Image (cartoon, helix red, strand yellow):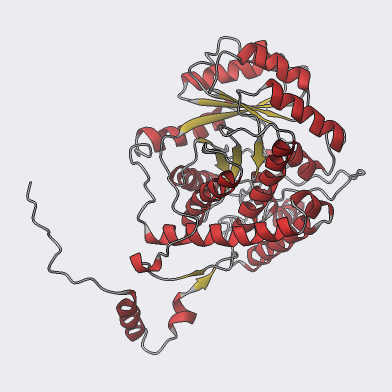
Amino acid sequence: MTKEQLFTDFPAVSSKAWKQKIQADLKGADYNDTLIWESPEGIKVKPFYQADDLNDSMLGSPSSETDWLIGQHIFVTDAAEANQKAKRAIKSGTESLIFTLTNPELKPKVIMKGIDINSIPVHFEFQFLSVAYIKDLLAYTGSAKGNIYFHIDILGNFCRTGNWFTNFESDHAALKEILNEASNTPTLSIDVSLYQNAGANRTQQLAYALGHLSEYLNFLNKNKLLRSDLIVCFKMAVDGNYFFEIAKLRALRLLWKTLAVEFGIKTDCHILACPTNRNKTIYDYNVNLLRTTTECMSAILGGADTVYNLSYDAIYHENNEFAERISRNQLLILKGESYFDKIANPADGAYYIEVLTQQLAEKALVIFKQIEQGDGFLKQLKAHNIQRKIKESALKQQVRYDAGDEVLVGSNKYTNEMDKMKKELQKNPFTKNNPRKTIIQPIAEIRLSEASEKIRLDHE
């Protein structure tokens, strides 16, 4: 193979020279007005990027290895049924299981019967808080150190429902006991997907993830439970802005490392990623397949450890084997046929993504510091400042959608008036408002197309 340097005859071109050439080609049009656009996070995006756009960020550079696992999410209401679904998924190529457990009557031995927990990582998400249940799970899964994740997130439940499971003191006492019992199992989880699905922009998502995490780390530190080998899991929702979402996950790792150093933690975090609900539609629902494919790609290239997909009909159909098989096959194709697991750090050196990563992380750090100066994330929640900021961001997105600037094909552009969905609805696809007494205003997930879909349904 020749060692000749093939491009030595081509002189390097500076950003200034490129800009001058572009300005000349614009024939009088303003460069900034014509080619630069601003993201919802306040990032001005240029038409080209070069090495001199990078700065020596105080946050460093993230690694984004592509050693990711294909996950299968299973919502568990019946233990035996969930077990059979899990076994079928494993036979079909699933590499990691994510169980959402709805009540403490679900028997761990039934759910996990015949599943080799030493060879397949398993995540347990809880819609309840029970020390006794955790003990039962540990009794069954204790031998599978490193393969079991408990997603305990009492603050996430507080954000989502507006109430603690029991009350502040009881929830934190239970968390303390669980952390002691499961000292060798990753236990703490930060549900960042809630903020994304409610309409928070990317810097808000990252900042709130840090604020959320800081509450837990301070709690651990206060109770002498903080360990240098602590592993925290972040659950992330990924939307359709391809490069920004790659950068968002990379920025999260940067921010994790920044906070981890402050608390003496030496381990990396675990990122569990899935497509967002926010841009999914009931009309022209097959477009959801395209959306979830690019969103999974962003998650993978951004460095997610485990990626599970959302079925194209998840928002309006009950769980069904056909849709779940299609969603799993999307990931299998990305891994087995598109080789999305063969390149280490695929986003490294892409100047655009590197710059976005730096800017998202630095802007999020500013918001996080403001939260900390305001006595922390929980205090800001109780003052409803977090909810207000998310609502403001969501409203901006909604205005763009209503004006047709934020395009969802089949819903607010290129609509098919012959598309009828009323008879297809097997479950309510809209945000449910259940009036109840709460401590804080809950953070509610809402899809962009809900209002326009209700109007279309009323006219079918």
Residue 197, image x, y percentages: 66, 49
The answer to whether residue 34 is left or right of residue 16 is right
The answer to whether residue 378 is left or right of residue 341 is right
Q: Quadrant of residue 40?
A: bottom right
Q: Residue at x 81, y 30 (%)?
A: 173
Q: Residue at x 85, y 49 (%)?
A: 440
In this rendered view, identify the residue nearer to me: 424 or 221: 221
Whether residue 16 is visible to the viewer of this picture, yes or no, is yes
In this rendered view, identify the residue nearer to me: 319 or 107: 107
Residue 277, image x, y percentages: 63, 46
Residue 233, image x, y percentages: 60, 36
In this rendered view, identify the residue nearer to me: 404 or 36: 36
What is the number of callouts on the image? 0
Q: Is residue 340 above or below residue 113?
A: below
Q: Residue at x 50, y 20 (%)?
A: 120
Residue 300, image x, y percentages: 45, 42
Whether residue 50 is visible to the viewer of this picture, yes or no, is no
Q: Is residue 248 above or below residue 106?
A: below
